[in-house]
Image (cartoon, grey):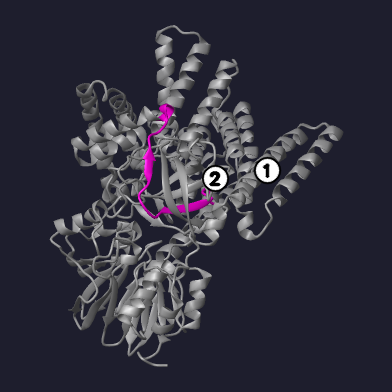
Amino acid sequence: MGAAGSPRHRAEARLLAPALGVWAVAWLVVSLPDLGVPRLVAPAVLWSGALGCLLWMLRRRRASAAALLVACSAAALVATVAGYALASRDASPLARAAASHGTAEVVIELTSTPRAARAGAGAPAWAAEASAHLLRADGTTVSVDGRAVAAVPVTVEFDPGEGRAAFASRVRVEVRVFSAPAAERSAYRLRGVEPGEVSPPPWWAGWAEPLRAALVSAAAGLGGDGGALVPGLAVGDTSAVGDGLDQAMKASSLSHLTAVSGANCALVTAGAFWVCGRLRARRGIRVLVAVLALIAFTVLVTPQASVVRAAAMALVVLAAFAAGRPGGGVAALSAAILLLLAIDPWYARDYGFALSAAATGGLLLLARPLGAALGRVMPRPLAFVVAVPLAAQLACQPVLVLLDPSVSIAGVAANLLAAPAAPIGTVLGLAACLVLPWLPSVGFALAQLAWLPASWIALVAHGAAGLPCSRLPWLPDAPGALLLAACTLLGLWLALARRRPRRLVLAAALALAVAVAVPLGAAGGAGLVSALGRPADWDVAVCDIGQGDAVLLRSEQHVALIDTGPDPAALERCLALVGVDRVELLVLTHWDADHVGGASALGGRVDVVLHGPLDGARSSRALGPLVDGGAEHVEVTAGRSGTLGALAWRVLWPEQRALPGNDASVVLEVDAPDYRGVFLGDLGEQAQVRLRRAAAPGPVDLVKVAHHGSADQSEPLYRELRASVGLIGVGADNGYGHPTERLLGMLSTSGTTVLRTDRSGTVLLDADDGAFRIWSERRDAGPPAGRPAGGP
């Protein structure tokens, strides 16, 4: 296997074993509380194991015992750090606020650049899901209800009001608190209930925000997909990347180019070394300048998981170089993984961290042997050019399957075509970012030059994504990832190993063919079987779009849609699944991203939009592509009515002069020939009480459960509705605990059959005199449900 088989390379590769073992331990220990295991169990077991290894080493004096001792001690340290962090979460007064579904006034410091939850219509003006640490005004603790406690990591959705939120900004805001699973890095999810008060970032971070803002502004003036990609290539800012380009980048396996990682850090450190070399600086000065440049770059792009991994690895390499003992890349990667997991065990479950580490490991371990193997069938220079993206793709694909159960076919070719342009666009974009505030003309000229390679990358992305069969379906979740990893290892063994028995090769090749063919057939065949079994006649379709709402109503081939969900691509998939191309009536219940974020998918395909009270920029972003596409939009309140084919609809809520928000959701009552239904938007309990008094909706056959099944519900309303079927649009592992046991208990008491998109996928209902025949995408939803309207 060439150089890859050298003793030094094999010794370095063995260093990965303890790193991967500690990674597996970290992945497990942070999730043990979710399984009911006390958080002290794992540290106790692992420290006992480390003690046993120590005694064994003292007795036998074997090198293997020393290696095992280091691995056990590192794992025990990670488990201890995780246990301490979990204890801090439980001790936070936010735990009490979350248990009571209450609110708290907090001060948060953003630990990432604020970004919209979804890059599309309806997304919040400023980062709806920015990571943050809770702090008091002095920057050391958090104050909730007058008590000060240690900072805990959170995810926050907030409106910055008149301020401009940026990385390291502090925001004082009143929030509603929700618990998150122990396996998530964020201890709690915070949702702002009113605009926050923003304080500027401190000096060490404040210098970077004007640079980023200047680059984004200049790139916006360049136009096209190239202008949208320039900030992403340079500093990882993808806020200008539209839904179409984003999907094309993902489908062509090029999205890593806008995720700042090892290549960017390598360019920065190499540039610092080059400048110092030209100045004939000593080695210590070179290392110091490189470290400072790396820290400044990390602040500029903000410390995302992939950036932190790359920076830690670079620091390990620089430290070894400064000591005069430069080590290999695999050793540096292993040390960086161990160091970061000891600091934050939740990195073990971070996809960005996993993809960054996997890509780096693939390049270090696989690129050279793959190049040598390919060199036997093609010119060697070309072979090594192909080997680089192939190695990264093979290493990352098992992780990517967890995010999207498919295998990219065009990814390697797309990366080969885009690879020459990426470093040029990155360097020119970064230079423009640094120059723009002081020399705007020069900076804009550099941005224009960066636009050229960025436009080429966008062209490659669209071309690769448009190829037929550019992605093949695969088994989802952990089984699919493990199977693909096994197939990859087996394929590499067949391609790289030499002097192997012929029978063993044939058996391995046959096993690989079966292992690949079976999941491809199962995944592809499942879609075909699903399409063949899907009923042609349906009256209601509940789209599986994750944590959000999107419900289709059909009457005499006329179609209405209530909300669009958070993701345009997910809505497109649902519309294609049920065969809907045009929506005559679109109801946007309110302006949260999980209800209107997918609206951009409907531009030019909607006739009329009904909505509640407008909400400034949020409602403008949602309505913009719809109005530009020719849709008429109408603000409605209780009493508005109309028809859709043979279906009559009436608005039950909101009241006149309602303020925007969940409690101003448009509540629609529909009366069709074979069923009667009510769609409750995101109304909270108090608004539901007022709705029941004002509208007296009475018994129905179908109810769209409010707010994804949260606990904020009115039991008397559901008792009055007595719906035979309750629809809940909810994402799997949503972190909010939706649907709650309280809500499910209410529906059970009311005799309501629950249909959840997290379990059943997209659901189609065919109404027949108040009863429903049910088809579900993922599993049999049970026997026909329902009773005649007005029945007992």
Q: Which image quadrant for residue 701?
A: bottom left
Task: Give the total of numbered labels.
Answer: 2
Query: For the residue labelled by badge 1, is the local secondary structure a helix, a strand or a loop?
Result: helix
Q: Which residue has dot 2 on it?
A: 152
Image spot of residue 658 (x, y percent): 27, 65
Q: Is residue 242 visible?
A: yes
Give the residue displayed 53% in from the left and 30% down from the top: 313
Residue toward you, 519 or 214? 214
Q: Residue furthest bottom?
A: 792
**Residue stretch rendered in magenta on the structure:** 184-205
Residue 710 is covered by the magenta coloring:
no
| Mark 2 vs mark 1, CA separation in Å | 17 Å
Q: Which residue is mark 1?
A: 80
**Label 2 element class:** loop
Where's residue 447, x and y in %? 24, 29
**Residue 201 is one of the magenta-drawn residues:** yes
Relative vertical location of residue 767 with respect to residue 194 in this rendering, above or below = below
Q: Position of residue 300 (x, y in %)?
A: 39, 30
